[in-house]
Image: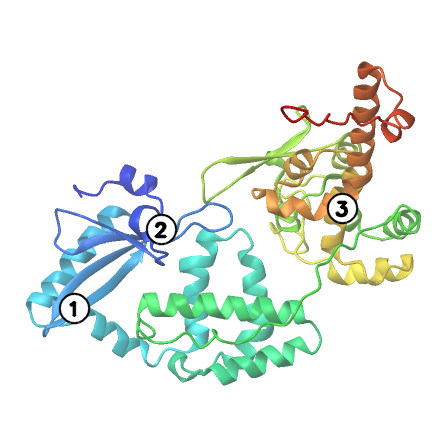
Amino acid sequence: MKKLTKKKIDGFKFEGEALKRGMSRDVRWDDEIPGFGVRVFPSDATNRCRKSFILSYRSHGRKRLFTIGTYGVLTLEQARSKAKSHLGKVEDGQDPLEDRQRKAQGQTLQELAKAYMERHAKIYKKTWRTDENRLKRYIIPEFGSLRVKAIRRNDIAILHQKIGKKTPYEANRNLKLLSVIFNCAKEWGYLEETGKNPATGIKPFKEEERDRYVTPDELPKLAQAIDEEESIYVRACLWLYLLAGIRKSELLQTKWKDVSIKHQELRLPDTKSGKTHYVPLNGPAIAILQNLPRFEENPYLLPGRKKGCHLVNIDKAWRRIREKAGIVDVRLHDLRRTVGSWMAQAGSPLLLIGKVLGHKDVKTTKIYTHFAQDHVKEALETHGKRLMEIAGKEPVSEIVDMPTKRRSKKKKAGT
């Protein structure tokens, strides 16, 4: 491969032999600096490709693979400079990977978690705040003071069981988060790259596929309970969930500059892809936005208590509201699911529902398929009647009594 450039790196995808062989990574080498390259990882569900700068070298006869840093955190120029510096150390008889691992041996999980948030989650995940909350609530209290190398699979299995007694879903999400964190630990030198990930090999809890949504019978009581809530911002937040199906993280972080009343949409910047994500708004949602007060010192649609910050958590308010409405089993995310469910029942195509809810993968929208079955049957029934009319037949009776034309047996020769 020729000299690496930013344009080339931006266009790299996980493909070729690495994809065919089912490998976990694909490396593109640079021809200017020996052993310097970019490691490309498989795309995630949102089609984003994580990339990191690496350096391959030999130290005391051993082949070493050193991760310089994450592309996006480091520029190509910065990575080149670091690669040259590390190669200089190798020439002097040092081993950069061994030096890093020696320093990392005393690192605690809390320090690793901080590195994970800065070097991975905030760069590649829209839902990084969810990871941050799980770390603070479950993982740091349990493992924060422990050295990364001291954490064993059994320790993680015990935590998984502990959380799973109350919420299997949350237990599985924490298990998956720890697995990603320990993969990063291997990549960054906190653990031997050839070592095992202690969060793997633990059987997740079985989860029931959730299809709960607010029914037409439940909506009037819910609407009344929302309207009785004191905070105008909590009321607005919940109504916008129900009306437009906006993701919680997107809605809470929306600023007034992202709102277009004229075009009836939110224009949310995607910091990772650099593209703008357009969220459509209907008339009632626009009316709610127009009634919200604005403050010069706070840019957010739904301001929080702290100056210049957005509304962070409405869980307590939601528990209070759903109890009043008599729907204690309905979660906040179920309000977003309500939008898709009601649209499907009204006959909206799944592709359109996916567009409204911002699904990048059509598989995500398929959970609404069963709501649309009646409309599928109606459409097929209409097609059948039209076809039979054009054919000049009665829809039912002539099908039932349709005569069968029998083949006549050929007479044998000579008879």
**Mark on residue 370?**
3
Which amino acid type is shown beneath numbered disc 2? Leu
Q: Is residue 209 above or below residue 111?
A: above
Q: Distance between the residues labelled 1 and 3?
A: 55 Å
Residue 88 % position (x, y)? 10, 62
Residue 239 % position (x, y)? 79, 44
- Location of mark 1 (residue): 63
Residue 298 vs residue 50, the one in the foreground: 50
Which amino acid type is shown beneath numbered disc 1? Lys
State the image quarter where residue 162 is shown.
bottom right
Crowdedness of circle 1 by 10 Å Cα count: few (<14), some, many (20+)?
A: few
Q: How many marks?
A: 3
Crowdedness of circle 3 by 10 Å Cα count: few (<14), some, many (20+)?
A: few
- Callout 3 secondary element: helix
State the image quarter where residue 297 is shown.
top right
**Residue drawn 32% across the image and 66% down it:** 188
| Mark 3 / mark 2, whichever is N-terminal | 2
**Mark on residue 19?**
2
Which amino acid type is shown beneath numbered disc 3? His
Residue 104 % position (x, y)? 32, 76
**Residue drawn 78% across the image and 37% down it:** 288
Q: In this view, does 280 lie above or below 163?
A: above
Residue 377 vs residue 117, the one in the foreground: 377
| Mark 2 / mark 1, whichever is N-terminal | 2
